[in-house]
Amino acid sequence: MIYDLAIVGAGTCGLFAAVNSHPLTTVVFDKNSGAKKLSITGNNKSNITNCMEKEDFLERYGKNGAFLRDSFKLFFKEELINFFERSGFDLTCRDNKVVLKDKISQEFAKMLLNKAKKSAASFREYEPVVDILKDKSMFILKTHKGIYYSKNVLLACGGKSFPATGSDGSCYNIAKKLGHSIVTPNPCEVPFCCKDVKNLQGLSFKNVNLTLKTEKRRFFECGDILFTHFGISGPAVLELSKNDFKQAKLLINFLGINEKELLELLTKKNRKIKNIVKDIMPKRFVDEMVKIDKYSKEASKKELKEVVDSLLGFEVDVEKCSFNRAFVTCGGVSLREINPKTMESKLTKGLFFCGEIMDIQGSIGGFNLQAAFSTSFCAVDSIKNNLYSTT
């Protein structure tokens, strides 16, 4: 059998491509059962998209944002919200993010997987594609179970983040073999690994000010963080991780105030320093980090400075954790080699891309999922147009 479309990867964009592929004859391949990574997105509370307007939205992808302009014209958040509402999901805008109102990511992933299986002519679970050859106008796809033929191929197999879910970067080799160059992949939306914070494991803080000091630059972020057994995570850390660095110093201002304001608070009343700090910080943090157990009037300037530094200038050496803990991959197939109007390769006719395999990444908050849905829809629409215009 010769398929109209072979989709390699059953993550967000691969499944959505299959859902929208009718009346194409479509086959879907995946290393697992499909939707593995999608089911754990957002700690099981997916940010489907974002409430921002289009121009502000595009800015959240940095210098590569303009690449998405054409696919967003074709399919953007309004169309995506309509799709979910037609599928029985209530959405709401919370903290500028479009989120599932009363369901979890696993339910959203299950819905998409079921729709994809109904739409595809064949859904090949646990059957990874190991090689793709192009022979004139036909693609030959090889798996450990057999050989398949298709007029078009959509590489929807993601990057290298969370490799246990199937996105282990193996599709980069397929893209390279078909003529494409790869911008070096790096873990993004990834926690920071660091030593000497295990004693703070489990403590979380809201609206802290972070300063990331690399060799060349400083980056700033405000938001929530969480201390873990391996380092520091949370939305603010994940947002900082998109910057290019290997090792850096992270400075944490837990209170978001300046030194003068904190000193006034510490010396306003003659109470024990630890008790004053316990009014504004978790007890376990104070017991671990505040060593001075004197009344404020008895504390020296040096001792007060130590307390101030622990609360407003907590410093730790950090590095990005590995792809095993990353939510997103930075880098991927070069956008210069992909037509942004169609998602088709400029080098190999009939080869298309969508989602995280490409060198485009957005901020946290639904931006990467929207890009996956939009580029997927654009690719399938282009394939339909190509096939029907020649028949």
Image (spheres, rainbow, N blue to C red):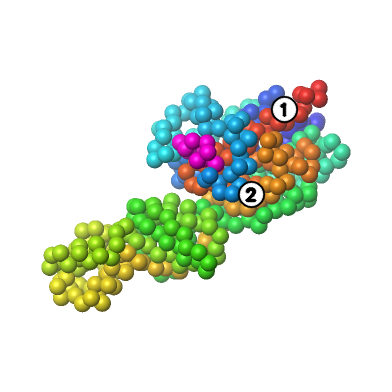
Between residue 14 and residue 336, name the one nearer to us. 336
Q: Please state which of the two labelled residues, at mark 1 or mark 2, is closer to the viewer.
A: 2
Residue assigned mark 2: 359
Q: Relative to residue 271, is residue 189 drawn left or right?
A: right
Label disc, if present, on residue 251 of the rendered structure: none
Q: Which element is circle 1 on?
A: helix
Is 57 within the magenta? yes
As shown in the figure, which amino acid type bears the numbered disc 2?
Asp
Magenta segment, which residues? 49-58
From this view, report whether residue 300 is shown above or below residue 282. Answer: below
Q: Can the viewer see residue 37 in this picture?
A: no
Q: Which of the image's four quarters has the N terminus?
A: top right
| Residue at x-position 87% and y-position 38% | 136
As shown in the figure, which amino acid type bears the numbered disc 1?
Lys
Residue assigned mark 1: 384
Is 388 within the magenta? no
